[in-house]
Image (cartoon, helix red, strand yellow):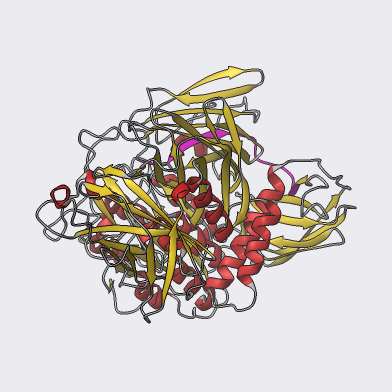
Amino acid sequence: MSQDLTRAEAVGGEHTSAGGRLVSVDGRMLPLRSVALRGDAAGGLARIVLEQRFQNPYPDPLRVTYQVPLPPEAAVSGYAFRIGERRVVGEVDRLAAARERFEQALAEGRTAGLLEQDRSSLFTQEIGNIPPGAEVAAELVIDQRLRWLEEGAWEWRFPTVVAPRYPGAEGRVPDAGRVSVDVADGPMAVAASLALTIRDALPTAAPSPHWAEGRVRGQAPESPSHAIATAGAAGAIEVTLADDGRGALDRDLVVRWPAAQPDVAALLDTGRPAEDRAHADAAYGLLTLTPPRPDERRGGLPRDLIVLLDMSGSMTGQPLTQARRVVARLVETLGDPDRLELIAFADRPTRWKARPVPATAAARQDAIAWLNGLEAGGSTEMGSGLAEALRPLRPAAQRQVVLVTDGEIGFESEIVGMVARDLPPGSRLHTVGVGPAVNRTLTGGAARAGRGAEIVVGLDEDPLPTVARLVARLEAPLLTELEVSGSALLDCAPARLPDVCAAAPVLVALRLRPAGGALRIAGRLGGKPWEEQVGVPPVAAGTGNAAVPALYGREAVEDLEMGRAAGETGDLDQRIERLGLAFQIATRLTSWVAVSEEATVDPRQPTRRERIPQALPEGLSAEGLGLRGRSMQRLGSSLVLRMASVAVETVMSAQRPQRLGPRPAVRLSGRIVLRRGRDLIVEITLDQLLEWAPPGVQVVWDDGTRRLATIDAAGTTRHGVIHPGQVIRLALRLATDGPVAPPARIVVGVGAITIDLHAQS
């Protein structure tokens, strides 16, 4: 694909200042029919298969676009689709090459799928040439790390919906069109199902006292988000949704189950790819660190606590209520020696006090009263509030910044880079994500850069255990100044190792020498030196846990992305691309692409395009998200199709003016989908009836350059009457090379028909 067709233009679409728009689904049969999650979880890792079924309800071939939320700590390590009895397995390719293969396949009439990463937690899937009436099932294989909860349980959290993300000023988010979200103005009839097999041995003893006030209260898996059913099977527990799955795609799906906490300081799980893989020259490991509790607590060290509270419009209603409860409980944990700052932000930051104050009982009471008087509204200008929080700490105190937000911004890398650059030495930044669809690219990335913890709490969850987990990280003894070395180690990720709470294991991804050796983990625990030794046995090619190498690749990519956000220079993009190709995982610069071997539709037949909207996240309002108001119009289904890169204006032949209505000219919108050498393919979406019969053409650039071009009949939509909503294709071959810049217009015949081309935002 040529450089003039950018990634943002590939899917395209205008965006609003709210980061999305409301679309009607009344009377529509959406191509997305069902979403199914199935997989296995054990020992802190899960391998999940996400299946999405799309059915074409039209008499024309269909191309669908669907935004897919995924866990940011996971690696997409497999992609395939099934059509009829055929299963088509994908592979990872460079971003531009994958897009070109996808578009070329569609031009040849083959069914193809493409999965591209927009953010670490947001992907876009396109499937083209779904035959009329046919069903395609797309399968994503996801290797995911689980989260350990201090009350003694594993948590599996999987997102199911995307909320609009505030893009800021025009041009602030280069790919704003790609991450803009269509939100359904009405219920979506999409079935959802779950089949999660838990292979951990659940404890048989009575639960600890912490569980009485925690989220996992019994000895069976529980969910704070959905009604679930459990059944035992062959030493495992099967978890399913208790209802029919309708309406389940409007919040994170969360399952928690009790498990015995590791009683050793370090556990190592290893894996090595087969010899034919690009990265089989090394072994890989996931190191679980659980420091022992020291004999003495750190008690007496005063804290400087600053809370940044998101008060933007998306926090209206239940999210703000939940956030207030979290912050109030956090304030109540402070004592007189501590100092407190509260900053609320939306369009601009608002301080509780002009400067930090001692956290006396009176001050804490006043702070909570101030919190209760806040109202949400406005945009999410997070950077200005964050700048005030990242100040040097006073001597003999540890500065802890806690960001409470739903994270719904489109300029996540800007905030993550700010934390990575400006966090004072000895300070930590933690994030509390609040809501049904937290943008974990922001909350996870900021916590990673701040060497702190990321905690997510849903709208219906009890916030007290959430605060207890956070306080455990703020107060409990920590393993700090952590370093991993030894004869077995090649490198580790994250490179900026976090502090380790005594009650919460942390996973570190490792690249190891296949011959094995020793690992040395060192740090300071309660102010005293701490060290642990781990032996690494030899790891043969093709053995061990297959998820371990993929998760190392993902962690290594996230390290590079954080460095890029912080302004580091060098070959970061090339290194990200190499990692994606070597580990066969999706990244910002590598995509999954799958193409059927044989043609499934006639490439000369008109097609349809459909962009699948997202459900309105639970507890959020269209008004609070800025999707409905005096300046926002409700958009019908005819306006859902988003086009980019090329606008086409056609003056049709005078021989058939009655087909075109009273106007002599017809203006159409379209886009360049493929430009390779002298070959050019333009797609045009019709919003009115059209007689389609193009003869030979000239292609014209803005500088006046002209090139003759012939029409490739095999790749061009056949002549005939085209109806509104259908997509037609024009395949051209230039007689000689043209400029690198995109063409400005096309002259059809001897001036009888003119097609003006102009770039769209």
| Residue 503 locus on image (x, y percent) | 60, 49
Residue 7 horizontal side relative to residue 749, left or right: right
x and y percentages locating residue 752 in the rendered image? 25, 63
Residue occupying the far left of the picture? 662
Closer to the camera, 143 or 401?
Answer: 143
Q: How many marks?
A: 0
Q: Residue at x 65, y 31 (%)?
A: 200
Q: Quadrant of the C terminus?
A: bottom left
What x and y, as percent, mark residue 444?
A: 50, 58
Q: Is residue 280 above or below residue 331?
A: above
The reply to whether the magenta stretch includes residue 123 is no
Determine the residue positioned at 46% across, 49% down. Answer: 715
Taking depth in this image into account, of 651 and 473 the one nearest to the observer is: 651
Please report the bounds of the magenta region as a residue range. Answer: 251-268
Reply above or below: 83 against 78: above
Q: Residue at x 57, y 61 (%)?
A: 589
